[in-house]
């Protein structure tokens, strides 16, 4: 059973070799003449203003958190989908309740405005 | 053979976690944590649970670590003083860890299945796993959905902005 | 010939074929895109290098390799180095589970035209697409440049939002095929493709895939007239090339996933299976180029609203409805 995975391993090795190879090749062939201005972060040619480490909106945090919640839900859906037929009505009702409970939370955060971008 | 891989992977997981909690740069710590989760996923695989291994990668490495990255960026954590020293010294641990994990995967996949003692004495195919989970532990599954509901609402309350707060109090017209 | 030698040769031949196909496919996809976009905008597109510009990809590659490739002084060097690699490798690895043709007979044995038919193929695809996020995010973060950071943040939350609807749109497919293996999913579509049996899932998946590819109309992470080039602003030379190649390989992979999951993979009348597969992939890839030539870019709030308020609930309802219909059609015994 396990040796059917062998091709994937070979593929991993080839893909890694490809990525490393191109980077190294570019490193060797490309000419390099670094200077302080050239190595500065690009800001349309103007002198740099402030730091690039800015704080970002809390919105992104909420999106990431909601993503985790629904991703875990999705992850429960896959094994359920494979054995759906064997579970029959019971499984359908079980997952119906599961999704319904989450939809309640979804509607709640929607109505409270968590999904709004202003 | 399997036992040896198991110990190597456990060591890799421990080392990665150790590196994660000692890094000054939070993003580097996240990278080491991702390594730890990969090692854990492979351990689950050895123990005969491919589905849990996939979950480990999809949820922990793919979702929760992304949240960590967001939080690091949100908190405006400036990376600490970059570690001095030759480049190879800074890169060695991460290359070592990734290397050992890839090598273990290689060994694991090419090894004869059930090679001697220490091999998996059961194998939970995704199908059987799903059937067991949804048949025997239906109540637990529903409880999980309640936990996810609390998580969604909690995240919203922690992260709601000033404007939504005002709207909730009702003094916005 | 000994058994293991044949196995090894077959594996290597298949890998070589797939690798060659993906890389030249990606290179010529760039050319095709430039040509088609040119025609859509009433101009010729590249036509100087070789007949009809056919050698253009080669010229591009040479140029990229010989370009100066520098690391910005404030960058996090290691992450800056590996980020494009992550982007390209995750894209390349996904093709391992895509079955690109019906099994053929070689050396008197059955050879499946798939690198590895994992029994958790769907999860493998989802796992890799959730890891692909790291290439973009780390690349943007490590550059330590404002535009790159903005691009990577945009990319991060766009990719995770649409990954959700993409994942949820696959659930009905697994419901209907009752398997995670992509080969079994294709075989389950021998009669009718799932795109016809379940059009809502197909449309949700198609739109999510467009967003996952970070191309117009969903190209906010690299919107060139707002944030220069987004997450790869600071990249040059072949490191930029890896991001670029990764993006086009990704388009091919996502087109193959649409083909395998919804368009019946290699099934089709008259022509051999493998031809059908590549015709379908070519058509979906053309669709990617076509949308780029036609649609304007979304605003960020529109993007998020569309993903979270339309696609996600629609996909969830679709899962339940599909389940209910399947139960009605063939009630389980016991």
Image (tube, coloured by chain):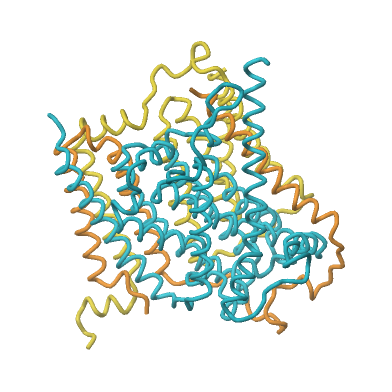
* Residue B71 appears in the figure: no
Question: Furthest-bottom residue in view?
Answer: B173
The colour of chain A is orange
Q: Foreground: C86 or C63?
A: C63
Task: Say which quadrant the C terminus of chain A sits in.
Answer: bottom left
Q: Is residue A109 left or right of residue C34?
A: left
Res. B49 image quadrant: top left
The colour of chain C is cyan
Q: Is residue A60 left or right of residue C285?
A: left
Q: What x and y, as percent, mark residue C118?
A: 47, 34
Q: What residue is at 65 percent from the left and 70 percent from the top?
A: C233
* Residue A112 appears in the figure: yes
Q: Is residue A104 left or right of residue B38?
A: left
Question: Furthest-left residue in view?
Answer: C334
Q: What x and y, as percent, mark residue C126?
A: 45, 47
Q: Foreground: C306 or C231?
A: C306
Q: What x and y, as percent, mark residue B73?
A: 52, 64
Question: Furthest-front residue in view?
Answer: C270
From this view, report whether residue B61 is shown above or below residue B45. Answer: below
Q: What residue is at 21 percent from the left and 30 percent from the top?
A: B136
Q: Which chain is yellow?
A: B
From this view, report whether residue C64 is shown above or below residue C178. Answer: below
Q: What residue is at 48 percent from the left and 22 percent from the top?
A: A1
Q: Foreground: C102 or B157?
A: C102
Q: What x and y, as percent, mark residue C275?
A: 53, 47
Q: Is residue B123 left or right of residue C33?
A: left
Question: Furthest-top residue in view?
Answer: B116
């Amino acid at each position: 059973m396990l040796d059917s995975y062998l091709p994937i391993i070979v593929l991993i090795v080839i893909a890694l070799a490809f990525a490393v190879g191109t980077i190294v090749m570019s490193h060797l062939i490309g000419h390099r003449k670094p200077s302080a201005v050239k190595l500065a972060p690009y800001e349309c040619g103007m002198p740099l203003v402030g730091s690039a480490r800015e704080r970002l909106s809390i919105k992104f945090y909420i999106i990431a958190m909601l993503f985790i919640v629904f991703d875990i839900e999705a992850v429960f859906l896959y094994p359920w989908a494979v054995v759906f037929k064997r579970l029959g009505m019971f499984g359908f009702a079980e997952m119906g309740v599961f999704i319904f409970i989450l939809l309640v939370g979804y509607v709640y955060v929607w109505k409270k405005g968590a999904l709004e971008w202003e | 053979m399997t036992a040896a891989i198991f110990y190597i992977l456990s060591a890799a997981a421990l080392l990665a976690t150790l590196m994660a909690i000692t890094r000054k740069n939070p993003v580097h710590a996240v990278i080491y944590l991702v390594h730890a989760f990969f090692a854990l996923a492979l351990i689950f695989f050895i123990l005969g649970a491919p589905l849990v291994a996939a979950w480990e990668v999809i949820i922990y490495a793919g979702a929760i670590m992304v949240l960590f990255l967001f939080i690091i960026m949100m908190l405006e954590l400036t990376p600490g003083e970059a570690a001095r020293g030759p480049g190879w010294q800074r890169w060695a641990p991460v290359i070592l860890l990734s290397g050992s994990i890839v090598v273990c995967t290689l060994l694991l996949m090419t090894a004869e299945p059930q090679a001697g003692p220490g091999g998996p004495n059961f194998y939970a195919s995704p199908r059987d796993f799903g059937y067991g989970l949804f048949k025997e532990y239906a109540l637990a599954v529903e409880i999980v959905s309640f936990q996810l509901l609390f998580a969604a609402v909690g995240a919203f309350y922690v992260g709601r902005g000033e404007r939504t707060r005002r709207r909730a109090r009702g003094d916005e017209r | 010939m000994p058994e293991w030698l044949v196995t090894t040769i077959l594996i290597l031949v298949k890998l070589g074929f797939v690798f060659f196909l993906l890389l030249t496919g990606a290179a010529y996809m760039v050319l095709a895109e430039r040509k088609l976009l040119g025609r859509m905008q009433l101009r010729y597109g590249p036509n100087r290098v070789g007949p009809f510009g056919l050698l253009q990809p080669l010229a591009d590659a040479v140029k990229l390799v010989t370009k100066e490739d520098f690391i910005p002084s404030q960058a996090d060097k290691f992450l800056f180095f590996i980020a494009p690699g992550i982007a390209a490798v995750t894209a390349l690895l996904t093709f391992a589970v895509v079955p690109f043709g019906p099994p053929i007979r070689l050396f008197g044995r059955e050879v499946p035209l798939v690198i590895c038919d994992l029994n958790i193929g769907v999860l493998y695809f989802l796992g890799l697409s959730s890891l692909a996020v790291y290439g973009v995010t780390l690349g943007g973060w490590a550059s330590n440049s404002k535009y790159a950071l903005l691009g990577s943040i945009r990319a991060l939350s766009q990719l995770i939002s649409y990954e959700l609807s993409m994942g949820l749109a696959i659930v009905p497919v697994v419901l209907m095929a009752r398997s995670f293996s992509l080969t079994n999913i294709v075989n389950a579509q021998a009669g009718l493709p799932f795109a016809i049996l379940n059009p809502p899932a197909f449309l949700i998946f198609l739109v999510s895939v467009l967003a996952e590819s970070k191309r117009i109309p969903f190209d906010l992470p690299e919107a060139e007239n707002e944030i220069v080039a987004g997450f790869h602003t600071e990249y040059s030379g072949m490191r930029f090339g890896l991001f670029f190649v990764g993006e086009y390989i990704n388009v091919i992979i996502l087109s193959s996933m649409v083909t395998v999951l919804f368009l019946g993979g290699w099934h089709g009348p008259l022509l051999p299976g493998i031809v059908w597969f590549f015709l379908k992939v070519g058509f979906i890839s053309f669709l990617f180029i076509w949308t780029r030539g036609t649609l304007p870019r979304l605003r960020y709030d529109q993007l998020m609203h569309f993903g979270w308020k339309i696609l996600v609930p629609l996909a969830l309802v679709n899962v339940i409805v599909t389940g209910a219909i399947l139960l009605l059609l063939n009630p389980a015994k016991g």
